[in-house]
Amino acid sequence: MRSPIRKTMDIVAVFLVAIYLAPIYWIALTSVKPMSDINSKKPVWLFDPTIEHYAEAFVRFEFGKALLNSSIIVFSATFITMILALIAAYALARMRLRGADVLALFILSLRFMPAVVIAMPFYLMFLKFSLIDSHIGMIVVYVGYGLPFAVWIMRGFLLDLPKDIEEAARLDGLGWISIIRRIILPLSGPGIAVTAIFTFVFNWNEYLFALYLTQADAVTLPIQIAKMVDAYTVLWGTISASVVMQLVPMVVVVFLLQRHMIRGLALGAVK
Amino acid sequence: MRLDEGRVALFLVLPTLIILIGLAIFPLGWAGALAFRVENLFRPDIGKWVGLRNFKYLLTDDTFWKSIRLTLIWCVCVVSIQMTLGFLFALMLDTRARVVGLLRTLIVIPVFISPIAMGLTWQFMFEPVTGVINYFLELVGLPGGTWHTATDTALMAVMIADIWQWTPFVTLILLAGMQGISPEVVEAARLDRVRGWKYLTNIVIPLIWPVVMVVLLLRLVDSIRIFDLVFVITRGGPGTATLVASVYDFTIFQAGRLGVMAAYGFLILIVINLVVILFLRLLYRQEKEARQVQKA
């Protein structure tokens, strides 16, 4: 029994959200518009869709290379981060460890560090080890960048599991490796998925470290896209095509996560 | 034979700790040391210890003070608008209706898109002559703006983009808080005929207050260190119109003045730490009070 006011508000909400996302439709629309229609003073709504901007992004602006770089760097970094975070979070959340809360807080506090402060020492270090503009260097940086949040959010999920499962399983005669493999891992599936995806998203969108530490061989997508603006004429068609290609995976991610994402964000923020 | 659990646990946390010390604490210490040195990226031969000279230099630099002022304006405007709008959206979406579930998913999309992609999108829409925003403004009879291209409107334009991107984050977390209010409380309020404005101020806001504080903290910290979005839309310009702290710090790096850059970075870090400590204190005190109320 919902009141008419509530119902009206729900309808208003649908409209507001639809309008709110307008910038995203606009850029998607622009990415398939013919060149001549993009810069017209009056927005053109009907046109023959084209994929020339997408092709242009690959041919003229090495979009493919940046995509490959981003994929290599972000997947590797996320994978390594997850392994470390899982192990550490398990110890912090579910084992008798003195000072576990303090340690967890210390790890979380690193998340507040402004990237501007540590990017430059990284630059100097990388100069020394000739890691500037290398995939390995970027993977290393992103592991450090994503780890604090990943440990924190994973710990939140693990703390939420019922308290005595391990003890109960032990009484049933399971060793601790099989406890983790057969009980903890399956139960924390959603938590692992959410943590991995968040880590992935942060890395995928990261800009500042990449700006300092890449030049040509290891440039990631955000860098490559931002570079297109520097070109002598700003090609909005090509830029919007690249923007769309960069954001599509993130929209897919949002839909994959759905409910879990809200819980994940809340956990990461609140716990 | 059973291993001591505490030791095993420590052994499991150790890799993470070592990596974080190497990749966060060590660079931080390095930056800290650089703040007290003259160090030039292009002239490595002139490095030397200079005590507080970098800090003194900053304090007498007008652009430094301007960047501080811009960052302050940025934080106050952006965070207050995001909190207000985010709260209103959360109220609107705090219902059980089916379609609203889908809306919750849709509204969060901006949070997941890179500030670079969104910054360029806004820049495109802001274009004074060909941009779609001015087109619609003029369509309804309003004058179009100069947005990011003029000194007096650039900051506002970038703020709009940031507010658009991060308001959903506030909404989502406040929403999680609102939905965490137990059904008994909601039911009791209904029986006592506490409704509308009173329900909001006496029940909802006090109950989600800790969540509000946490979101406020996260938004504040992110606003103090704002970089990507401003950098991609305006590079701090036109002139110095949007030269917020991190962007100015980056231009100092580009000029090769590592010592000054590190000093400024450290000031930003100190401010962030003060904010975090202040908030944690407030939260802690609230929790204590809440517990005492429960006991009474």
Image (cartoon, coloured by chain):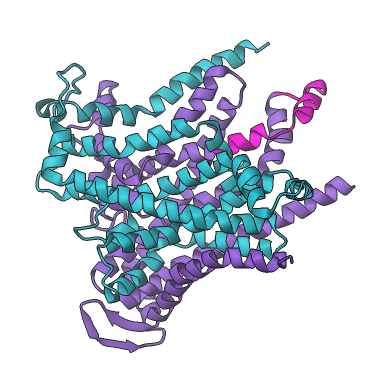
Chain colours: A cyan, B purple
Q: In the image, residue A86 lies at what x, y percent?
A: 55, 53
Reply yes or no: does residue B11 show up in magenta: no
**Location of residue B28 in the rendering, given as x and y in whole percent from the top left corner:** 45, 72
Quadrant including the N terminus of chain B:
bottom right
* Residue for point 34% across, 27% down: A22
Q: Quadrant of residue A216?
A: bottom left
Comparing A126 with A14, the one in front is A126
What stretch of residues is rendered in magenta? B172-195
In this view, the residue in front, B21 or B177, is: B21
Report if residue B184 lies within the magenta region.
yes
Identity of the residue drawn at 31% across and 47% down: A71
Above or below residue B121? Residue B197 is above
Residue B263 visible to the viewer: yes
Residue at the image point whose x is 72% and y is 29% from the top:
B198
Judged left or right of residue A107, residue B228 is left
Residue B129 at least partly seen: no
Q: Is residue B187 above or below residue B24?
A: above
Image vertical order of residue A102 relative to residue B115, above or below: below
Spot occupied by residue B31 in the image (x, y as percentages of width and height):
40, 75
Tell which of A7 and A255 is nearer to you.
A255
Marks counted in the figure total 0
Q: Is residue B80 left or right of residue A235?
A: right
Where residue B32 appears, x then y in whole percent?
A: 43, 77
Dominant secondary structure, magenta = helix
- Residue A52 located left or right of residue A72: left
- The foreground one among B150 and A130 is A130
On the rendered structure, is A262 left or right of A243?
right
Compared with B194, B71 (above or below) is: below
